[in-house]
Amino acid sequence: MITADGGSRMGKKVLYKSLVDESLKLAQSPPEKVLIFRRGLDPDMPTVAGRDVDWHEFAAPHAGAQVPCAWLESNEPSYILYTSGTTGKPKGVQRDVGGYCVALASSMELIYCGHAGETMFTTSDIGWVVGHSYIIYGPLIAGMTTIMYEGVPIRPDAGIWWKIVQDHKVTVMFSAPTAIRVLKKQDPAYLSKYDLGSLRHLFLAGEPLDEPTHVWIAGALKKPVIDHYWQTETGWPILSAVPGVEQTRNKFGSPSFPVYGYDLQLLRESDASEAGPDEKAVVAIVPPLPPGVMSTVWGDDERFVKTYFTTFASKMVYATFDWGIRDRDGYYFILGRTDDVINVAGHRLGTREIEEAVSMHANIAECAVVGVADALKGQMPLAFAVAKDTSTLASPEGRKQLEKEVMETVDRQLGAIARPKAVHFVTLLPKTRSGKTLRRAIQALAEGRDAGDLTTIEDPAALEQLTSALAGK
Ligand code: AMP
C-alpha cells in the first residue's frame, strides 16, 4: 500500500495514516508493506515496525533510475477500479493494457486536441476514473505535461484554477459541473484577471451539465465548453463532440453524439426495440465493446455478464444503466440512472452501500437511503432510519446526537462525500407486501413530487411518518 501521512482540504489537515492502519486491521489480505510519503502534516504519526517504510528512505537509492519498459500481452490487466451498482458490493472494473492505451491515445488527439509538449489540467483526483485516464495515462501517453491539483477551486481564492491555466499555459482543461457551479457563485472578475489565451477547450463530465452553468462558463471563458458523457466502466467518453475530427454545434444539456468505436442504441425497456426520436429509453452499447472499456469484473466473469449484459432478455447488449433520448438532429441527452446509483458532485455512489454504512451504527435496525436533488452537488443522499432503542430519540438533543453519530459512521466507512444531508428517524419504512423498500416513492416525496402509484404499499402509516419527518414534525 502506498499512502501519505495526510492531505489537506480547505486549509484543514486530513490525516490518512490512522485510517490506513484501521482499514488494514479489517483487511482479509493486508499488504506486507506500507510505503508512506511524509508531507510533514502529521509529525506524531505512529508507525508499525517492520511494515511501514518511509518513502524518502526507500526512494533515495533509486533516484534517477531508468526503468525499462515491461512488454505485456495487450489483454493483461492494467488496473482495477471499484465502482458502485445496485448491490452493496462494489464491482472491480478491470481494464486491459493495449486497448486502453489505444483508446486514450486516440481520444487525446481527436477529442481533447492535446499535443505533445503542451499541458493538460484535469481537476479530478487519481482515485476516480477521470484521474486515472486524464490526469495520468492519457496526457502522459500523448507526451503532455499533466497537472495534479490538491484542494478546492476557491482557495486561496476563486481565481486559482485560472492562474494555473495562465502560469502553465494549459491547452486542455477537464473538470466537473459541480466545480463550475461553485465558481459561478464567486466574483466573475476572477475569470478576466488571468490570461487564458493558451486554453483551447474546457471539457466537463461526471454528471449532467445544466444549461445555466454551461451558458455561464462558456460566456465567461469565451472558449468552447464541451459536455461529454462516460462511466468508470468505459474509461473514456461514450458521448462527446469530437473537435479533432469536425467542429459541431453545441446543444445545451447534450453531450452531443456517440464517439467513434461505440455502437450506441436507445432501447425500449419493455421489449428492447429501438426508441424513436425524443423517446426516453435505456442507453445501451452493442458489443463488441470499444477498446479501453472494461474487460471484466475482477475475479468474477459471471458477474460481469450478469450485471451488464442481461437487462434485456432478447438482446445481449451492454446496459449503461442510464436513461437517454436522441433528438431529431441526432443529439443525445442523458436523463439519469435506471438503477439505485446516485451522483453526488460527480461522484458515483450506490444507495445500498450508504444503507449498509448507516446500518453499521449499533443502534440502527433498518434504513433507506435515496438521492435527492441538490442545487450545487446535483444530488445528495438522504437517510431514513429505524432505531433499535428509541429512548434516545425522545428528546431533540438525542435525535441530533444519533444523527451525528450515524453521519460519522458513514464518513468512516465511505468517506465524507457519502454523508447523508440528513438522517430522519421513523419507526416504519414504506415497503411493498413482498418487503421491497419503495425507494422511488421515498425519493419523490423527499423532492416534493407526486409519489405515484402506492397501491402496493403494505402499511400506509409509513408514508405519514415519512411526510411528517420531511416536514420536520
Ligand atoms: P462514474 O462511473 O462515476 O463516472 O459515473 C458515471 C455516471 O455518471 C453515468 O452513468 C451517468 O449517470 C453520469 N454521467 C457522467 N457524465 C455525464 C454527463 N456528461 N451527463 C450526464 N450524466 C453523466
Image (spheres, helix red, strand yellow):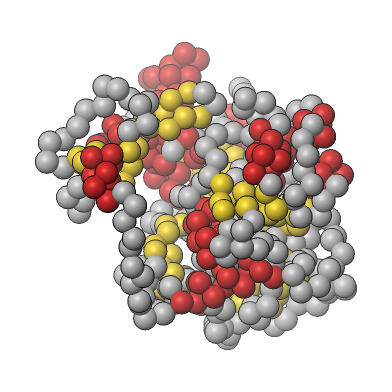
Q: Residue furthest left?
A: 50
Judge by depth and name the residue closer to the eye, 323 or 16: 16
Picture quarter with the C terminus: top right
Query: For this view, does 129 lie left or right of residue 180?
Result: left
Vertical relation: 319 (above or below) 156: below
- Left or right: where does residue 340 sit relative to residue 72? right
**Which is more toward the observer, 373 or 329?**
329
Front in this rendered view, residue 30 or 172: 172
Looking at the picture, how far across and down is residue 370, in whole percent?
A: 56, 45
Residue at the image point whose x is 75% and y is 50% from the top: 199
Looking at the image, residue 179 lies above or below residue 271: above
In the picture, residue 388 is in which quadrant? top left
- Any part of residue 459 in sight: no
Q: In the image, residue 255 lies at what x, y percent?
A: 75, 62
- The residue at 46%/57% (across/down) is 83
Vertical order, 375 against 457 (above or below): above
Residue closer to the observer: 32 or 428 = 32
Q: At 33% from the left edge and 25% from the top edge, which residue is drawn? A: 42
Q: Vertically, is 165 above or below 171?
A: above
Residue 146, percent from left and from top? 56, 51
From the viewer's perspective, is 76 left or right of 109?
left
Count of numbered circles on the image:
0
The residue shown at (33%, 72%) is 70
Residue 272 location, quadrant: bottom right
Q: Is residue 59 visible?
A: yes
Q: Position of residue 22 (x, y in %)?
A: 25, 36
